[in-house]
Amino acid sequence: MTFKALLLENQPAFSAHVAEVDKAALPEGEVLIRVSHSTLNFKDALAIGNTSPIVRAWPMVAGIDAAGVVESSSSPDFRPGDFFYAPEDQEAVMAKTIPAGSVGTVDDVVGAALYLLSDEAGYVNGETVAIDGGAHLRTSGAEDLLAWTDADWEAHRASRG
């Protein structure tokens, strides 16, 4: 079985990329979670930037703060089927609250994370980037934009010349 992950490697040179990783390549004694929601945490952002000696073992699947369902576990603290923040059957419910109509995936986050950690983003600082399918619009003061149709957006773009 494989899964998509943000993989950090240091051979032959450092790289951070989305890769299909075989479940068998995971270290012993771990908890495998079917993730429904995730964010990149600070330490792993440092690891992706390769500017701090934070990685202990290579290759490394960049850690994420995740919510989902435990698939398998060798830890006595977690059992298969345990909910880890958000149950799987809630994914469809949560997707209905997101204007894009689905919950995010690694692919949705990794491009922005890699950009923000790259030299090209050297002038960007103190910025919060909402990669949430438009969910932030529900509490942003721009709720009326959620009701706009494609025609409304097209008319708005045309009015800007």
Image: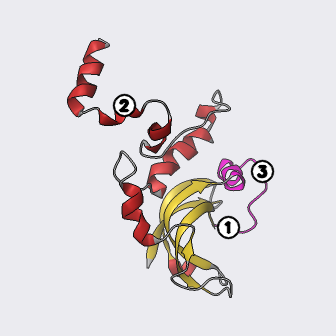
Query: Which residues lie in the magenta part?
Result: 42-59
Q: Which residue is mark 3?
A: 52
Q: CA distance from mark 3 to mark 2?
A: 43 Å
Q: Secondary structure at mark 1?
A: loop
- Left or right for 47, reference 147: right
Q: Residues within 10 Å of mark 2 (few under 14, many from 20)?
A: few
Q: Looking at the image, is mark 3 or mark 1 earlier in the sequence?
A: 3
Q: Quadrant of the C terminus?
A: top left
Specify whether residue 62 is in view. Answer: no
Q: CA distance from mark 3 to mark 1?
A: 14 Å
Q: Which residue is mark 2?
A: 144
Which quadrant of the structure image shows residue 124?
A: top right
- Say which residue appears at 47% left-offset and 46% top-offset: 132
The answer to whether 34 is drawn above or below residue 47 in the figure is below
In the image, which disc is placed on residue 58? Answer: 1
Residue 106 colored in magenta in the image: no
Q: Are marks 3 and 1 in contact (CB under 8 Å)?
A: no
